[in-house]
Image (tube, rainbow, N blue to C red):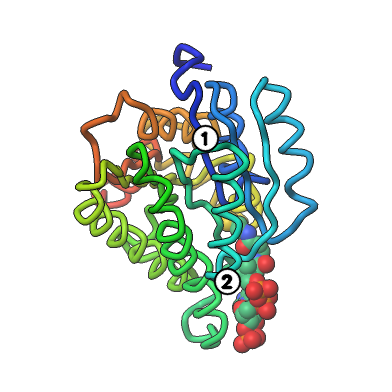
């Protein structure tokens, strides 16, 4: 790991969507830095293997099954994590749903499912965690995206949800700073090795994205883990309301029309 391996020593985190993909990487990165980690998913089968990998890093792990769309289930699971670890310092809102669908074919329920999981789920978890985060000052990290900076075909539902997450990040940062709670986001571009890129970056899209990225490659899970560790550690103690883009410059380069 890039940093000295003690950035989060003695702390406790809850990572939604932490069983797989980028958020599994974040859970393991936090564990490697001395943080106890609870991971939450609606699918139990995603949780156990990652919990074993967390424990292998010498910290405590907790598997929590819940759908982030259910506020009372969320409240109960957040309370369980805080009770199990005796504290809660960090929350990562990573639970998300996605599929490719043009707006003209998108059903009200399809649009609503992604808004409910990504945007409303982020709100439910953050609100449920606030009483615990307030105890010592804490950190919320939301997983955003860059899709909504421009116009991304077949991603209207996710773009709208992530734009909402950016707004929520800034508003909560402004409201909860008085409690010593920092609220930030990371906005990954396409990250190789993830289910999202395997399913969503189809045909020539992967090649095109790589070619257009100034840093010349797709991102890795570790790229996002390092940014997340920074924002959730004391190294970022005066940073709140920030949305840190981790995309090798891809979205900026999308504006180039010459050449
Ligand atoms: N294209 C168009 N609409 C789709 C769709 C697709 N590929 N996948 C789901 N939907 C629509 C469904 O048709 C349904 O709308 P309807 O009732 O009008 O038919 C609505 O979305 C809800 O789908 P459903 O599967 O019943 O809901 P769910 O709550 O079980 O799951 C998702 C919702 C978004 C999580 C689901 O698409 C999913 O499981 N995706 C794969 C996992 C994932 O997204 N991981 C994140 C990787 S970035």
Q: What element carries label 2?
A: loop
Q: Answer with left or right where residue 20 lies relative to residue 130.
A: right
Residue 253 seen anywhere in this rendered image of the structure: no
Quadrant of ligand 1: it is bottom right
Mark 1 or mark 2: whose residue is earlier in sequence: 1
Q: In this view, does 237 lie above or below 129?
A: above
Please name whichever residue, 70 or 20, is drawn nearer the observer in this view of the structure. Answer: 70
Disc 1, SS? strand
Q: Across the whole image, how many numbered discs are drawn on residues? A: 2
Q: Nearer the viewer, residue 80 or 47?
A: 80
Q: Which residue is drawn at 58% across and 45% down?
A: 83
Question: In this rendering, would 217 be left or right of 194?
Answer: left
What residue is pinned by disc 2?
70
Q: Position of residue 254 (x, y in %)?
A: 32, 50
Q: Tell whether circle 1 marks a residue whose Cβ is less than 8 angstroms from ligand 1.
A: no
**How far across and down, in percent of the image, does residue 207 sit?**
54, 44
Which residue, given by chain and number where applicable, does mark 1 sit on? 12
Image position, residue 234 (x, y; %): 33, 25
Residue 104's disc number: none
Q: In this view, does 163 lie above or below 183?
A: below
Q: In which quarter of the image is the C terminus?
A: top left
Quadrant of res 60: top right
- Give x and y (percent) for residue 142: 41, 50
């Amino acid at each position: 790991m890039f940093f000295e391996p003690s950035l989060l020593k003695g702390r406790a985190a809850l990572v939604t969507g932490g069983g797989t993909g980028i958020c599994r990487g974040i859970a393991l990165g936090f564990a490697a830095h001395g943080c106890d980690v609870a991971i939450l998913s609606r699918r139990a089968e995603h949780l156990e293997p990652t919990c074993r990998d967390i424990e292998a890093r010498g910290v405590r792990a907790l598997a929590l099954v819940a759908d982030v769309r259910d506020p009372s289930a969320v409240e109960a699971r957040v309370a369980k994590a805080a009770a199990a670890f005796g504290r809660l310092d960090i929350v990562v809102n990573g639970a998300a749903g996605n599929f490719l669908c043009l707006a003209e074919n998108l059903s009200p329920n399809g649009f609503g499912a992604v808004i409910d999981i990504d945007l409303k789920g982020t709100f439910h978890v953050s609100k449920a965690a606030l009483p615990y985060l307030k105890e010592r000052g804490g950190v919320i990290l939301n997983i955003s995206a860059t899709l909504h900076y421009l116009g991304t075909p077949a991603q209207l539902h996710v773009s709208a949800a992530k734009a909402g997450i950016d707004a929520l990040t800034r508003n909560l940062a402004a409201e909860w700073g008085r409690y010593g709670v920092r609220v930030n986001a990371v906005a990954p571009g396409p990250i190789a090795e993830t289910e999202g890129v395997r399913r969503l970056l189809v045909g020539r899209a992967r090649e095109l994205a790589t070619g257009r990225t100034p840093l010349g490659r797709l991102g890795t899970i570790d790229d996002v883990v390092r940014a997340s560790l920074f924002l959730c550690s004391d190294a970022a103690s005066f940073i709140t309301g920030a949305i840190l883009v981790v995309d090798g410059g891809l979205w900026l380069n999308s504006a180039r029309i010459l050449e």
